[in-house]
Every structure is written in structure tokens, then in C-alpha cells.
Amino acid sequence: MLHDGHGAMVVDPGDAQPVLDALQSERVQLQAILVTHHHADHTGGVDTLRQTTGAQVYGPAAEAIPQPARGLGSGDRVHAVGREFQVMDVPGHTAGHIAFFCPEMEGSPLLFCGDTLFSAGCGRLFEGTAAQMLHSLEQLAALPGATRVCCTHEYTLSNLKFALEVEPGNAALVHYRAHAQQLRAQGLATLPSTMALERSINPFLRSGEADVIASARAYDARAVDRQGVFATLREWKNHYR
């Protein structure tokens, strides 16, 4: 949730009650609900919040999300709490997944990417293809390095375990895992991440790196090009424990 002391916006409210509690605590009025994709853990609180607050709902035009809502796609803009968010199409996890990007928020850009990009990981391919997800991630990776990556699940430690399996010689990964473990031991979130950090540690953004390619080919010799390497990494991660 973001607010300016008067109005507020919330992204992907899977449950209404924590949002209602926060609105009451901060004494702000919910004005906008932003939805990245249709999965219930991102939309479960939308109806209650809209009915309780009258907030406008914004979400992907290509997906079935709680209605009424303003459908969005690439190039659209959303204005909320005094900021403008650019909409990006990032299919892969779902067919119509979108992301919201604000180029300027308190000194650095801000990205709400739903389940497309996680810290050191990415979403499963439930509806889209590996080619779509790779293209989506390349779009996100091209954003400024200072961009704060606000993904929607605290999967960082398990993602880092897999990332180190893929790229054990990556010193940035080793350093960041120690930092993330320390944060989680204190009950703190590892998020938001930054795009610069993700470009240095996230195997799904590094499918052109020699060590990542070698690991993918060792897992499946059919990983012959960047798309094949990415698809192999995603399949490997699906079964990794």
C-alpha cells in the first residue's frame, strides 16, 4: 500500500482485512486498487475493498478479474496518490499479466511486477510460454538499475538456493544470500529488491551468461540457445527441492 497522508492505493490485495486495518491505522482513504493478474491470492480482497471504500479497480484487460474494473494494457497510464504508473504487458506467468512502473517515486523508480519477477527468481509458466516470459523479463531487466522491485511473494531464500545451484561461482549471489538470511533471521523482508541487484544474481535474467548456460546444458543438453536455456532453468526450478 502507498499513501500520501490522505489517499491510498493498494496492489494485488489477496485479503481485504489487512488493507482495511492499515487504512484505519493510517487514517487514509483507499482510492485505487491495482491488480497485476487474475490469481485469487492477488484478487481475493478486491470485491470487499471496492464495496467498502468505493475505490477504482485497475487490472489487465485480457484477464477475468473482479468487476467493475478499468482494463489496462501496454502503454496505458494510471494516476494514483499523485503519481503516474506506466502499464507494461508481461505475459508468461499468466496470459495477460501486467506490471506497473513509476519512473519517479521518492527519488527512484518503483515497479510492481506481481508474479513475473521475484528476487532471484521468476513465476511459473502457468499460461504463457518460455518465449513470452523471457521477453517479459528482458523488458523488466531493461529498467533503470535503481528501480525498486516490489514483487508479491517472499520466496527469496529458496530462490537463492536454486540460483547458487545454477551459478555457484557468482560472488554477488554468495554475498546476497548471507544478507538475505540475516534479514529473515530478524523477521524482516528481503523486499523490495533492485533491478541492478537482480541483474547480478537472478539466473532467469542471466540466461546469456556462460556459467548459467553451462549449468543449463549440463541439466538438459537441448538448451542450445537463450530461449532454450531459460526454458531449461524454469523446468529445472519446477522440480528443484
Image (cartoon, grey):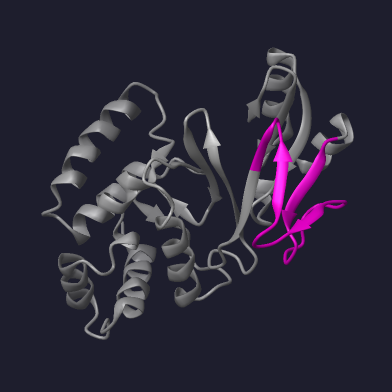
Residue 224, located in which quarter of the rendered image? bottom left
**Residue at (15% x, 66% y) in the render:** 211
Locate the N terminus and report the quarter of the image it occupies.
top right
Q: Is residue 33 above or below residue 115?
A: above
Residue at 32% x, 42% y: name it: 157
How many numbered dots are placed on residues in this image? 0
Q: Position of residue 82 (x, y in %)?
A: 69, 31
In the depicted structure, whether residue 11 falls above or below residue 202: above
**96 relative position to 193: left or right:** right
Residue 122 rendering spot, x and y as whole percentages: 43, 57
Image quadrant where one finds the C terminus? bottom left
The magenta stretch is: 55-84
**View extreme (left): residue:** 169
Q: Is residue 9 visible?
A: yes
Image quadrant of residue 6?
Answer: top right
Residue 227 image-quadrant placement: bottom left
Nearer to the camera, 31 or 169: 31
Q: Nearer the viewer, residue 234 or 111?
A: 111
**Place of residue 52 in the rendered image (x, y in percent of width and height, measured from the top left):** 87, 30
- Residue 45 visible, this angle: no
Compared to 96, does 164 lie above or below? above
Please provide percent x and percent y for residue 228. Answer: 33, 80
Asked whether residue 61 is drawn in magenta, I would say yes
Q: Is residue 74 left or right of residue 205?
A: right
Residue located 49% across and 40% down the image = 109
Examine the structure image and report whether residue 195 is included in the region drawn in magenta.
no
